[in-house]
Amino acid sequence: MNEPTAKAVTEKPLERYARILEIIAGFPNGVSPAVVGDMLELPKASAYRLIRSLAEVGLVEMTAPPAATCRIGKRLTRILFSSAADDWFVSAALPTLNELAAETGQACFVARLSGFAVRSMEMVAPNNQLRAYIIPGQEIPLHAGASAKAILAHQSDDFIASVLGNPLVKFTPYTRTDVGELQAELKEIRSSGIAYCVNEDVEGFGAIAAPILVGGQRVQQSLCITGTTHSLFEAAKDRNIALVRKMAERLSKMLERKMQGDPSLTD
């Protein structure tokens, strides 16, 4: 059996785990613990023990021996997904935003959850847009903005309860502040895949939004169109809903490919 090297003996335990994760991440289709051990000059039994410890907390997934292989686990993937830089997503989403703005004639934007706040990331408005009241970086009320509700609806029960347990500002006479009504609305959003804002944050204006869903990941982004209530809901409601849903699905697939390491999606 291989003896531990002087380097392995003096190396800090967390450093070993970090190096193991770095190696496994380089093999998206899986790598055997024996190969990981060889690359780190560790005894096979030690490599297997360390990898199994990572697997027990969800940072690594490992198949059963004798032909054991390991790959990055879902928990670590969620962590990486949550901390992904906004710059890449904004750049990748811009063509879709431009297309959606051209198709609907409305201002379009993507929003992202950060902590307990949802903020707009990027907006595109057509040339004839007289007023776009959502600007990049603006915080959107979780109980009144369509883009925020589309994200909130897909959070954990504890997260939702924490948000709705805070004092809810009544921006207009149409703003819902009753917790029971909001819970029912969030349930409907989860069912339909579409969130609405009708005069709830600014009278005369509204929005239609859809969550950007990535399998196995926490919902953090949404796609939204915003404009006057007449242009959104009276002139072409069904068409606007269909376009928002279609474009959100496109962005979802793009993010899934990114998470899977598609080389065509560069940083």
Image: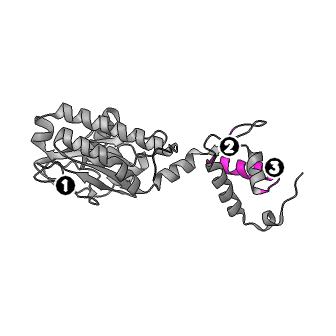
Give the farthest residue toward the front. 264
Q: SS of the residue at dot 2?
A: strand
Residue 263 in view (yes/no): yes
Specify the amino acid type for callout 2.
Cys
Q: Does 241 appear in magenta?
A: no
Query: Is 36 placed left or right of 142 in the picture?
Result: right
Labels 3 and 1: the sequence-earlier one: 3
Query: Is 204 placed left or right of 53 in the picture?
Result: left
Residue 170 badge? 1
Alpha-carbon span between mark 2 and mark 3: 14 Å
Q: How is this picture coloured?
A: one colour
Query: Is 52 placed left or right of 78 in the picture?
Result: right
Alpha-carbon span between mark 3 and mark 1: 62 Å
Alpha-carbon span between mark 2 and mark 1: 51 Å
Residue 44 badge? 3
Query: Is 115 placed left or right of 30 in the picture?
Result: left
Q: SS of the residue at dot 1?
A: loop
Residue placed under numbered mark 2 in the picture? 70
